[in-house]
Amino acid sequence: MHVKFCGFTQLSDVHTAVQLGADAVGLVFYPPSPRAVTIAQAQALIAAVPAFVSVVALVVNMSQDEMIELANNVSFDIIQFHGDETPEQCQQLASAVNKRWIKALRINAEQHSIASVNAQIDKFAAAGASSILLDAYHQHKYGGTGARFDWSLIPQNSTLPIILAGGLNAENIAATVELPIYAVDVSGGIEQDKGKKDAAKMRAFMKAVKRDRWQNETLSEPSNMSS
Ligand SMILES: O=C(O)c1ccccc1NCC(=O)[C@H](O)[C@H](O)COP(=O)(O)O
């Protein structure tokens, strides 16, 4: 089980996340978001991220020129496409900056079935995605909604490792124990205010993951990407 904390704007919060053992920190490059960072802010935050912790650049419907500008100025590791990007657009944008990428699918119980989620995952897998992130659909927001989606729509045999996002917190991690996921992603559940993380909530989240998920996992089944 891997843990990504998302939506950092403050240096002290990045220090805390790293100390707590987060595998990845996410920075939001989407100006309408209350968690958005500028290139200068991102550079300062990334300076606090040591080796073996990935920096994820979260983007929404970015143009190729914007992506190149971002990659030329910010040393991130992975792109998280969180908008309406098609598989072809993700592939093109990521190859323009030579980065690995994740696609966020926003799950709407009224429109999705397990089969349709799987079909979408397969298309992004074929285009070269490294993982798929499943998040809650919201009519007016692209992400960071703090809402959960219907977890029964998570496919058991996905072609890509699944990162679960949307409304997670220290209290509901226990309910994810049986889910076929590779990683969890949280933003609102570790905040005191938008973009301002809460050290106690980050610590409680990591403790809950260790207690509820890592205890259930074994090193003896390396072929199972979902655990
Ligand atoms: O955080 C935002 O404001 C945001 C804006 C636009 C697209 C995505 C955004 N955030 C994505 C995330 O932080 C996470 O990947 C995910 O949605 C979890 O958020 P939360 O439900 O708050 O834990």
Image (spheres, rainbow, N blue to C red):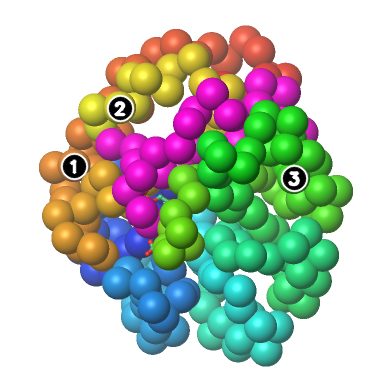
Q: Position of residue 58 (x, y in %)?
A: 51, 65
* Dot in front, 1 or 3: 3
| Alpha carbon separation for disc pair 2 and 1 | 13 Å
| Alpha carbon separation for disc pair 2 and 3 | 27 Å
Q: Residue at x 66, y 44 (%)?
A: 131
Say which mark, if any, is on residue 120: 3
Q: Outermost residue toward the front?
A: 110
Front position in the image: 97 or 28:
28
Residue that badge 1 annotates: 201
Q: Secondary structure at mark 1?
A: helix
Give the magenta part as a residue range.
Answer: 144-169
Q: Secondary structure at mark 2?
A: loop
Above or below, 185 relative to 128: above
Mark 2: give few (<14), some (14-19) or many (20+) Cα within 10 Å.
some
Tell me which secondary structure the magenta stretch mostly adopts: loop
Front position in the image: 118 or 79:
118
| Alpha carbon separation for disc pair 1 and 3 | 33 Å
Q: Position of residue 32 (x, y in %)?
A: 39, 78
Q: Residue at x 33, y 20 (%)?
A: 174
Q: Position of residue 105 (x, y in %)?
A: 60, 49
Whether residue 53 appears in this view of the structure is no
Mark 1, ligand 1, within 8 Å: the answer is no
Could you tell me the amino acid type at mark 1?
Answer: Lys
Above or below, 63 relative to 8: below
Q: Residue at x 23, y 63 (%)?
A: 194
Residue that badge 2 annotates: 172
Q: Tell which circle, 2 or 1, labels the residue nearer the N-terminal end.
A: 2
Could you tell me the amino acid type at mark 2?
Answer: Asn
Q: Tell which circle, 1 or 3, labels the residue nearer the N-terminal end.
A: 3
Residue 170 left/right relative to 174? left
In the picture, residue 67 is in which quadrant? bottom right
Mark 3: give few (<14), some (14-19) or many (20+) Cα within 10 Å.
some
